[in-house]
Image: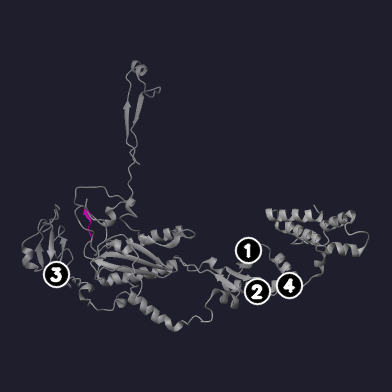
Amino acid sequence: MESTAKKRRCSFNKDWETTYHWVKPVQGDSQRVFCEVCQSSFSVSHGAPERSGREFGSRKPRREEGEPRTEKMPLDQDWTAVYPAATPFRAGSVPLPVRMGYPMKGGVPPEKKGNLELIKIPNFLHLTPAAIKKHCEALKPFCTEWPSALDTDAKCDEHFPIKVECTDYVSSGLSVRNPSARIVQLKVKLSILNLDDHARKKMLKLVGERYCKDTDVLTITTDSCPLRQQNYDYAQYLLTVLYHESWKTEAWEAEKTVADMEEYSWEGSPSQKNIMDMLLRMKVAGEGEGEEVQEQLLARSEVQEYKDSVTRLKNEGDNESSVLQYKEAVKKVFNL
Amino acid sequence: EQYKIVSRLTHSPGLSTLARSSLLCSSSGLRGLHVTAACCKNRAARIRIGKGNKPLTYEQALHPHHIGHCKGWLSQHTSNLKGEEGAADRTVEDVFIRRFMFGTFHGCLANEIVLKRRGNVLIVCTIMLQKMIPQKIYFLIGYSEWLLSHLYKCPVKLEIQTLQDKAVYKYI
């Protein structure tokens, strides 16, 4: 078959058919033979089939691939058993004649067998209504009813005034942990807390930016600890400490100056002194000096109105109504 | 980019031609360089058309500018969303896993590999040709899952489907 002097390629020899029963010629290619045992063709350009090292002895024939499962599926099967969890699309498991892809000109979209597009997309075959019912049934033993007494938002606020907010993050990556999940936000309305005037003012000073005047809500955000549990405990501790500290009066609080005051108070201010002096000079109350005259003047309604208008101007700022009120009060005091 | 450069070497015989030529002059001889405009053809993921006997899968036939229109995405994860981190790490992992699968199942892959990430689970979906006996494929599946899980410290699952031949979309 193979010459040693001059190398040339072997081609099919008819004698082989008698020697090896499994050999059949391949049309169009004399260098290849077809083996009936394993249903495949191979090259014989390097020698006889025996010498090529294959097919020696009987080899197990190539197993035919079975028919896909879709052929054997009954119509009333339990689909939740076929797709119990989220899995990519399997053409042999889904008995639907689905097609996906941009069709060739004059053609149809490619079929589902070997279709990569169907595998790429997320599918919800595991979330059919029957499957969701099963999930709900499985979760029911762990759920309790919402208490019927808490049917309005107001009642919820009344019984549970402190609101704690944490966020959980879902993402795909090597780790499911997200460091931003440790942040805890605690919200409480200051009107709930039992604070007198001094305590409230001290609390507001201690808290600073965290208090929102419009909604009367104190927000404490903690993220300094690595765990959410620790941040929650810290936020609760902060609230407790703030409450107790604002009730205490320290020695140095007596040094509070006018600049530290949150609101304008008319008693003892330059405005009071000015108007007292002016009224005394005008001799409105008649003759007499001393404390009684002062008290009398203070008790006058015009003076009270003036006091109100000045307090309002200083606290609220300059808007039309407060300025008008001040003008009216001044006119009354001077009897204009 | 492709530049088609045509260079012509001209040798001047005498001083008279030197005076007349307007090309680049040097003390001895003349050399001319003629350059055509660059032909900036896009070659990304494109198989050039041939005689009509080359089979192409859907993935190979549609070019990258069809992604989002006629093609889907081969790899899905949340890192490309706003506020999420780790996009570069995921991309590097994807590249490694594609090369790894291409080498482990050499000659058996019928199409590109689809990677899906669900939480921290990595699901590698492939379509393979029935070239190896099932026992070999089972071994390679177990080997890949084990090795990749240990490399990336996250559960890696392989979802294999097999075909007799590649699914041809068109012939180029």
Mark 2 vs mark 3: in front: 2
In the depicted structure, whether residue A329 falls above or below residue B155: above
Question: In the image, which is nearer the foreground, mark 3 or mark 4?
Answer: 4
Residues at circles 2 and 1 in contact by the CB criterion of under 8 Å: no
Spot the residue most to the top. Answer: B16
- Secondary structure under tag 1 reads loop
Three-letter residue code for mark 3: Val
Q: Rounded to the nearest whole Å, what is the CA distance between mark 4 and mark 1?
A: 20 Å
The residues tagged by marks 3 and 4 sit, at their Cα atoms, a distance apart of 98 Å
The answer to whether residue A223 is magenta is no
Kindly report the distance in space between the C-alpha atoms of the residues bearing marks 2 and 4: 12 Å
* Labelled disc at residue A214: 1
Disc 3: which chain? A
Name the chain under label 2.
A
Q: Mark 2 points at which residue?
A: A192
Residue range corresponding to the magenta coloring: B166-170
Residues at discs 4 and 1 both on one chain: yes
Q: Mark 4 points at which residue?
A: A196
